[in-house]
Image (cartoon, rainbow, N blue to C red):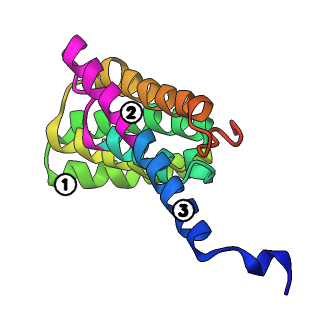
Amino acid sequence: MSATTLRPPATGRRAAWATALTAGAMLLGATALLGAVEAVTGRDVFALPFVASAAVLALAPGAPLARPATVLLSYPPCALVAVAVTAVVGPSVWAASAAAGASVVTMLLLRAPHAPAAVCAAFIGLTDPGPGYPLHTVLPAVLVVLGAALLAGRLLPRYGYPPSWH
């Protein structure tokens, strides 16, 4: 028997628990930071798209869709496309659908796929938060989420973020 097969069964469970608790701690920290920023600024940064981004970064920090450059490149153009769609047709389920579809095309053309950015586009199409939303809400929220992940990558031993920027 090799040394690798003699590992006690609890080691695998301990490692799984440690990984799960680390991801949970990262997500808790990111969402708490989003909540604090919202409480201080009054901006709606604690919104589902940004919580979803934090969850992606917590659950799969090494995935291509979690890379900092991908997150930074996906949100602003998707939000701008959604603002444009909503300005033309008005807020509705149809605008949300069109904005989400257009955001997927945009992300793929930019080679920056980050699914929560499509959720953000749909939210904009559904609610029409205004033309300033990409600058005064989306950008700060994305920076908070990325900042939390980068900080967690330095503080949490089992959380290796970012594996690469691009």
Nearer the observer, 4 or 125? 4
What type is the residue that disc 1 sits on? Trp
> Where residue 12 sits in the image (x, y, percent)?
59, 69
Nearer the observer, 76 or 18? 18
Residues under numbered marks 3 and 2 in contact, where contact means CB atoms less than 8 Å apart: no
Q: Secondary structure at mark 1?
A: helix
Of label 1 and label 2, which has the lower sequence position? 2
Q: CA distance from mark 1 to mark 2?
A: 35 Å
The magenta stretch is: 27-48
Mark 3 vs mark 2: give the one in front.
Answer: 3
Question: Is residue 69 shown above or below 112?
Answer: above
Residue beneath disc 3: 14
Residue 56 in view (yes/no): no
Residue beneath disc 1: 94
Q: Which mark is residue 29?
A: 2
What type is the residue that disc 3 sits on? Arg
Question: Is residue 130 shown above or below 52?
Answer: above
Residue ID at (52%, 47%): 107
Residue 62 in view (yes/no): yes
What type is the residue that disc 2 sits on? Gly
How crowded is the residue under tag 1: few (<14 C-alpha within 10 Å), some, or many (20+)?
some
